[in-house]
Image (cartoon, rainbow, N blue to C red):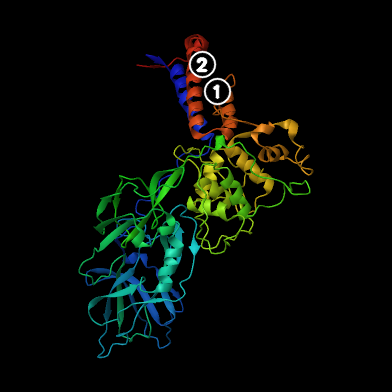
């Protein structure tokens, strides 16, 4: 038998552990929808079509059953005063007949079942087309975030309306270059669902006795007239991102058909110096896949894979200075850093054993530029993939860009799972992974208000502080003002001197000890509070070890308390579980 009071205390332990977990930012972001690049057909029931919008004088509509089909009826009211300047619409999330939301990522055709009924020898709508426009989507990551955009022109059905029989109107999206480009541009960073649907059913007035019955709407990847729905596809694997799309440079290919699965191969290309292969990245959906994973061909087209690497540079072995001041003895800590300067700083700390490079893909870098070898080296390692054909070396580098370059060269095989909440860095941002990684591992810090300000330019003082954290350099306070005339009272004076000094100058020491939580306090509340404070400088693994330590300590505290019967006996409330 167990007294209620003991049971309550054990429950309190479990509750406290849960509170510990809640005291920290989230761990492990939820995996993205597996159907990101769904190659499929999804059918929308007629009830998803709401009613008229705009000027619909002389027309009426309702949901009804016609010829065994659930349809939306459109007909004349008998009035001679008519307007065809109206559309059918639906606001809100769209779900198919199975209740699944409808993504447009691979939408190539919209197909509508219809029956145009007319007693006239020459039906008014015969030969007319239908127009479609879609104006709202929502991202999978935030279904309340409505994104409006306009297609530059309407998508017209490729076939025309016929009378007195069931038929289909086929509206091609893929055949319209402007719409296709817009869809790809909008959806390149994730999955977006259909939120608003608009289409214009009439190009001209209907006859007074005519009726148009609109049935199901299908959004699908293949043309409805195709006899063979599933096509032959190729998956191309490349050695690096710069080769992606040039199929003659693929280091491996796999042939398959739509919806067929295959096993992702290992990497058989040339590894960058200091790197090990980590995963494949599918350029169609942006997702990461491991060699040996089973991959289903869902894109409805050929797809490309580029490698992701983990870099393991021995930063602790770098003992030289990596930045200097100006001829007049100043450092100018608040000056911004250019992209060329940032490339020099980062390339310098990679170590002397890294082979130099002197060729770069950037078209705006002269062959005699002082920074060419630094940019070429980083580019050869894939660290400058965020920039296009122009590097713009004199442009001030942003905080996000510097963080992304560092992230590209980091050893992420043991990523921290602690995901900090940064109010001005969104999951959909290109630099999200880089900023979260750097913040979780103590490489960067935000401002007092918790923001990161990714688009702001980074100063020389901030830059050396970030680099010193990568190198694990701890400044020595005694030498803060010894190097430059304008840093004595600056918040980063020690960091600046450490960056501009070699190990022989004793201006810094190396912190090689892994940070761990030290159990502090005399009760559960104090244990949890101390871990929360320490967690700002701990990795996810260290936090989990801290939680384990607190759990063990709390169990010991309970076991070492006086007998619960002795504590609560005077209250005369005894409950037993048998």
Q: Nearer the viewer, residue 194 or 452?
A: 452
Label 2: state its secondary structure: helix
Q: Is residue 77 visible?
A: yes
- Direction from residue 241 to residue 514 in the image, left or right: right
Residue 274 x %, y %: 46, 42
- Direction from residue 514 to residue 502 in the image, left or right: right
The residue furthest bottom is 121
The residue furthest left is 227
Q: Identify the disc placed on residue 417.
A: none
First of labels 2, 1 by sequence position: 1
Q: Identify the disc placed on residue 557.
A: 2
> Vertical placement of 181 versus 13: above or below?
below
Label 1 near label 2: C-beta < 8 Å? yes
Q: Which image quarter: residue 511?
A: top right
Residue 226 x %, y %: 23, 70
Q: Nearer the viewer, residue 517 or 359?
A: 359
Q: Which residue is mark 1?
A: 524
Label 1: state its secondary structure: helix
Residue 106 x %, y %: 35, 63
Residue 270 x %, y %: 39, 49
What residue do we see at 56% from left, 23% from top?
A: 518
Q: Residues within 10 Å of mark 1 (few under 14, many from 20)?
A: many
Q: How many marks?
A: 2
What residue do we see at 42% from left, 44% from top?
A: 30
What residue do we see at 45% from left, 40% from top?
A: 28
- Direction from residue 337 to residue 182 in the image, left or right: left
């Amino acid at each position: 038998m167990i007294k209620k009071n003991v049971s309550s205390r054990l429950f309190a332990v479990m509750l406290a552990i849960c509170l510990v977990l809640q005291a920290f930012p989230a761990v492990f972001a939820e995996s993205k929808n597996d159907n990101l690049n769904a190659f499929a057909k999804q059918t929308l029931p007629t009830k998803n079509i709401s009613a008229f919008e705009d000027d619909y004088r002389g027309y009426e509509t309702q949901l009804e059953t016609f010829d065994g089909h659930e349809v939306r009826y459109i007909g004349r009211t008998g009035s001679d005063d008519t307007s065809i300047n109206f559309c059918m619409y639906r606001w809100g999330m769209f779900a198919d007949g199975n209740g699944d939301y409808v993504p447009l990522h691979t939408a190539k055709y919209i197909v509508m079942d219809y029956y145009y009924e007319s007693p006239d020898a020459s039906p008014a709508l015969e030969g007319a087309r239908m127009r479609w426009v879609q104006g709202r989507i929502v991202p999978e990551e935030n279904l309340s975030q409505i994104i409006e955009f306009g297609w530059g022109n309407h998508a017209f059905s490729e076939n025309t309306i016929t009378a007195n029989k069931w038929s289909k109107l086929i509206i091609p999206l893929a055949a319209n270059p402007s719409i296709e480009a817009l869809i790809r541009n909008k959806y390149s960073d994730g999955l977006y669902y259909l939120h608003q649907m608009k289409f214009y059913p009439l190009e001209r007035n209907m006859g007074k006795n005519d009726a148009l019955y609109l049935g199901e709407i299908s959004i699908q990847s293949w043309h409805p007239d195709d006899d063979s729905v599933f096509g032959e596809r190729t998956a191309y694997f490349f050695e690096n991102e710069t080769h992606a799309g040039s199929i003659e440079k693929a280091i491996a290919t796999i042939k398959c058909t739509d919806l067929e699965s295959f096993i992702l191969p290992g990497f058989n290309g040339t590894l960058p110096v200091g790197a090990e292969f980590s995963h494949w990245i599918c350029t169609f959906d942006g997702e990461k896949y491991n060699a040996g994973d089973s991959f289903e061909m869902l894109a409805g087209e050929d797809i490309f894979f580029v490698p992701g690497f983990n870099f393991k540079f021995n930063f602790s072995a770098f003992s030289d200075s990596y930045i200097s001041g100006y001829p007049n003895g100043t450092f100018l800590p608040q000056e911004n850093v250019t992209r060329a300067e940032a490339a020099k700083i980062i390339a310098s700390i990679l170590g002397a054993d890294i082979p130099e490079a002197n060729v770069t893909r950037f078209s705006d870098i002269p062959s005699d530029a002082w920074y060419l070898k630094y940019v070429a080296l980083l580019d050869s390692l894939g660290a400058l993939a965020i920039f296009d054909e122009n590097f713009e070396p004199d442009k001030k580098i942003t905080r996000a860009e510097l963080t992304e370059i560092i992230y590209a060269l980091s050893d992420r095989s043991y990523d921290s799972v602690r995901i900090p909440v940064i109010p001005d860095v969104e999951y959909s941002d290109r630099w999200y992974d880089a900023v979260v990684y750097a913040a979780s591992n103590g490489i960067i810090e935000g401002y007092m208000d918790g923001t990161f300000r990714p688009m702001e330019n980074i100063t020389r003082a901030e830059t050396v502080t970030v680099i010193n954290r990568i190198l694990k350099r701890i400044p020595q306070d005694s030498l803060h003002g010894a190097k430059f005339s304008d840093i004595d009272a600056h918040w980063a004076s020690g960091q600046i001197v450490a960056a501009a000094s070699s190990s022989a100058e004793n201006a810094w020491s190396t912190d090689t000890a892994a940070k761990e939580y030290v159990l502090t306090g005399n009760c559960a509340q104090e244990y949890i509070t101390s871990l929360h404070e320490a967690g700002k400088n701990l990795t996810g693994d260290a936090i989990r070890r801290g939680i384990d330590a607190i759990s063990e300590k709390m169990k010991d505290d309970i076991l070492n308390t006086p007998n619960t019967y002795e504590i609560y006996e005077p209250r005369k409330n005894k409950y037993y579980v048998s």
